[in-house]
Image (cartoon, rainbow, N blue to C red):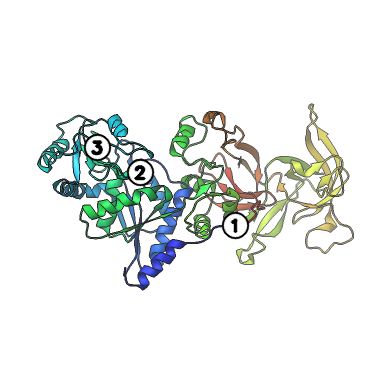
Amino acid sequence: METSNFIKTIIEEDLKNGKHKEIITRFPPEPNGFLHLGHARSIIQNYHLAVSNNGYFNLRFDDTNPVKEDTVFVEGMIEDIKWLGVKWKNLLFASDYFDEMYNRAIVLIKKGKAFVDDLSAEEIREYRGDLKNPGKESPYRNRTPEENLELFENMKNGLYEDGSRVLRAKIDMASPNMNLRDPVIYRIQRAYHHNTQDKWLIYPMYDYAHPIEDAIEGITHSLCSLEFEDHRPLYDWVVKECEMENVPRQIEFGKLIMAKQVTGKRYIKQLVDSKAVIGWDDPRLITISGLRRKGVPSQAITNFILATGLPKTQGETEYEMFDKYVRESLVEAKRINAVVDPLLVEITNYEDSKVEYLDVENNRDFPEMGTRKVPFSKYVYIEREDFIEEKPNKKWKRLYLNGEVRLMHAYFIKANEIIKDETGKITKILATYDELTKSGSGFTERKPNGNIHFVDGTINKPATFRIFDDLVLDFENKDIPFSEKINKNSLVEKHGFVEALEYNVLDRFQFARNGYFAVDQDTNEEKLVFNEIVSLKSKFKR
């Protein structure tokens, strides 16, 4: 398992040798979707590397493509990052620097380092060559700076149609690095921008805008994932040739890739649009909003990200590893009883109108959490899977016909008779209890065949339980359409009962013997809905 953080070593060395007095990092998302667990690595690591090394962290939206961007995504990302506990010093937008980017493009043109090209997008791709063959220069590459200045200003003023002209950096069409073959740095795009409205008709490309933004903000270490490694020479070229005062250092790290999880915005959008999921915050997704709705504590995400480190390489990480940190963060959850698939038990020798209240610890590992009163009466619900007509073997430690178990914190009960409906399904168990076996009484004359939980049959709250499984069944076969890979049983709703307590949205509980659950936002006065967060036992093996 890779748990190194090589960038931390670089930063510490830079501080030690006096290269930087403070560390400034940033997270620069494009507001064209919602954040997911993979983004959390960049967010949390950028933040912690800065604040733990005498520095600060900026949140900057790279909003250079207005066609795909929206304030809905901006607001959603802000909410997600706040929830993660990350605090930025400055909230910024690439569009804050559009004037400066335009001026720096003028600098490039005057130096003969950029030119206006009339080739179409298809022709530019054709001229670019490939990894085996060098590109060839555009016939418009040798326009004079004066001519380029006029054409570029005309682009800005809307004299040309979208796509008819672009501004390209003049670098090297024979470079083995495709990113240096005269990349496009400005295009004409008539589109309403969420921040600058209709001011601009030309917009900078990401590879041009990003290094300028970093330099303006004084970013010391520009951290990005490995796919930008080949872009680093262009990043450095832009900083140098645009004559930026501050010179950031781009460093690449391995992406966090979660095995068997849907992260691509295109695929998530397809799931949302087809109503295969509830929305972008569906608990089956690993979007930050989906994890929050599911009931995952934000601290679990931080602990997981810091534990996985910041490696130079990337590989898949099993989701069970993440679950391990979620489970650890829930150890202080209140422990209550919930019956997900209920089976009614009538205790025939218990008084009809009697209700007694058992004193039960909220969490035995944390006695300071106190106790609560759990009702017990003639009727109780147990899990259907906790009963079987005939005991199958010695390992069966639950209730069976003529067998005896303890109801947690209550009494021994013995199943004497079962009632079935016309289909043969068991609808009720008739049982008797032994009043001498009350929990805490010290009764030792015989041992029960197990210890099972229950919810009182009359004093309870009906609830819906959402149980989740893998959303997509096949990530290997590319011949199968994505829509056919969706697991139709990835969400199963069950109906049962919980203790009669007060429940608020996002309250988290450990349901005895069932797992960890959280109250879903669909809960209202008429219905109570729980999401399964994680099972009680870990499947993760280091």
Give the side of residue 424 with respect to residue 133, left or right: right
State how far apart marks 1 and 3 are (Cα): 65 Å
**Mark closer to the chain start, 2 or 3:** 2
Q: Is residue 423 above or below residue 506?
A: above
Q: Earlier in the sequence, mark 1 or mark 3?
A: 3
Are the residues tagged 1 and 3 within 8 Å (C-beta)?
A: no
Q: Which residue is mark 1?
A: 333
In the picture, measured across the screen, residue 150 lies left or right of residue 139, that is: left
Q: Name the mark on residue 159.
A: none
Residue 479 horizontal/vertical position (percent): 54, 29
Nearest the viewer among 161 and 86 is 161
Residue shown at the point (72%, 48%) measured from the top left = 454
CA distance separating discs 1 and 2: 35 Å
Residue position for label 3 = 137
Residue bearing mark 2: 31
Horizontal arrangement in the rendering, residue 466 relative to residue 305 (left or right): right
When asked about the image quadrant of residue 251, the answer is bottom left
Name the amino acid type tagged 2.
Answer: Pro
Q: For mark 2, does the 10 Å Cα neighbourhood hold few (<14), some (14 to 19), or many (20 or more) residues?
A: many
